[in-house]
Image: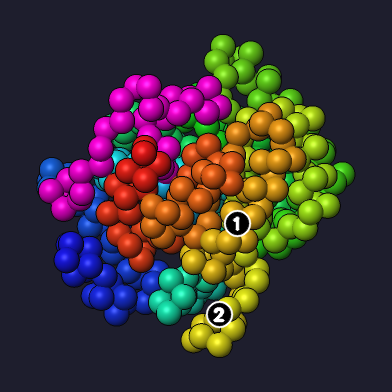
């Protein structure tokens, strides 16, 4: 039995948000003391030929941390000890916001799942910039971008562009999150005309900043798993038209199939973990076909073992990332997935 298997029952006695905050705080303490790596499995270092080049970036391994765990960039150095090939922090919004009322985070242990309706709770992009200045982490770091809850949906591009401008050149890439189910009307941005206009604005802003800074910073788009084949075809055409740098598939689902009968199974919010695994993989496969290799895919959703990561790759993902799997499996999942994908 590893250290996390001993610790998890104690954490699961706390409400999920308290356990989350306690864990981040203690990870930071252990890292500062130089003790954290002693509790973590050693992730194999892949030789250069096995590094994956995506979005013009050289990933030392294809396994990343998904956004949501460290919204404010408070534990970047500690999370860097886990052996991930890349980290994604956030989501961050232009202005601080408290998110939705508590309770807003629920475990469904029988389904190895989480339901959250956090609502982009974060301290704002200026606070994140301060934390970025204080980190020693030099690996690949992405930031997930959201819009403030009170920004009208027709002005959403403005919020993304504010964050893009402030973060440009200070991180490896950013992700435009248009798929969180916990910000009113956000998923409307996945529609045809709205998506076309948003992508045009983002790519125009990226091009101007690239010229201004003399360097290119990639922009990924994170989409929902709750899409039909027509939506996927239409979105893929727009991603190709605007030369999007990467697609993250997928976010959490609004479906409650298979968990309706469980305690908290009917709570509002996005469902992650095992119940979204197959839905996410199917969406990856459909986008891989529709994108014709023109846009790389980062696969997320329901990765709880090495075989799950492998299934995402076989469906067309170039990289993978997870968050809920870390809650249920612990840091050993990083090593397991890296080993599975390096075979």
Label 1 element class: helix
- Can you tell which mark lies on residue 217? none
Residue 242 drawn in magenta: no
When asked about the image quadrant of residue 161, the answer is top right
Residue 288's image quarter?
Answer: top right
Q: What span is colored magenta in the figure?
A: 36-64
Is 281 on the left or on the right of 198, as rendered?
A: left
Across and down, in percent, residue 327 comes to 36, 63
Q: Callout 2: 10 Å neighbours few (<14), some, many (20+)?
A: some
Query: Which residue is rendered at x = 54% and y = 61% of the image?
Result: 277
Residue at 66% from the left image edge and 31% from the top image edge = 293
Where does label 2 land, which residue?
259
Q: Which residue in the rendered view is the most extreme toward the right? A: 193
All told, the count of numbered labels is 2
Image position of 90 (left or right of 328): right
**Quadrant housing the C terminus:** top left
**In terms of image quadrants, where is residue 145?**
top right
């Amino acid at each position: 039995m590893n250290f996390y298997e001993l610790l998890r029952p104690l954490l699961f006695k706390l409400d999920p948000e308290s356990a989350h905050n306690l864990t981040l705080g203690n990870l930071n303490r252990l890292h500062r003391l130089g003790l954290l790596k002693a509790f973590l499995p050693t992730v194999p270092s892949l030789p250069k030929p096995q590094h994956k080049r995506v979005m013009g970036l050289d990933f030392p391994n294809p396994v990343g941390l998904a956004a949501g765990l460290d919204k404010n960039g408070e534990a970047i150095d500690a999370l860097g000890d886990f052996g991930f090939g890349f980290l994604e922090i956030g989501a961050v919004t232009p202005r601080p916001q408290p998110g939705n009322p508590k309770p807003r985070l629920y475990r469904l242990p029988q389904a190895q799942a989480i339901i959250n309706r956090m609502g982009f709770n974060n301290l704002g992009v200026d606070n994140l910039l301060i934390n970025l200045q204080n980190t020693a982490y030099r690996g690949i770091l992405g930031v997930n971008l959201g819009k403030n809850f009170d920004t009208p949906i027709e002005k959403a591009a403005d919020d993304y562009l504010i964050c893009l401008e402030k973060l440009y050149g200070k991180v490896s890439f950013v992700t435009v999150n248009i798929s969180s189910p916990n910000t009113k009307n956000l998923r409307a941005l996945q529609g045809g005309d709205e998506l076309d206009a948003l992508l045009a604005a983002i790519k125009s802003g990226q091009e101007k900043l690239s010229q201004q800074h003399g360097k290119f910073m990639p922009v990924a788009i994170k989409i929902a798993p709750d899409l039909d084949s027509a939506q996927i075809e239409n979105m893929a055409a727009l991603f190709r038209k605007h030369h999007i740098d990467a697609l993250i598939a997928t976010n959490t689902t609004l479906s409650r199939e298979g968990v309706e009968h469980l305690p908290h199974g009917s709570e509002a919010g996005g469902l992650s973990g095992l119940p979204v695994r197959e839905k996410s993989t199917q969406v990856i496969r459909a986008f891989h076909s529709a994108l014709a290799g023109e846009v790389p895919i980062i696969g997320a959703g329901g990765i709880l073992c090495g075989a799950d990561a492998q299934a995402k790759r076989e469906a067309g993902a170039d990289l993978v990332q997870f968050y809920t799997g870390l809650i249920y499996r612990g840091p050993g999942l990083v090593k397991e997935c890296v080993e599975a994908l390096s075979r």
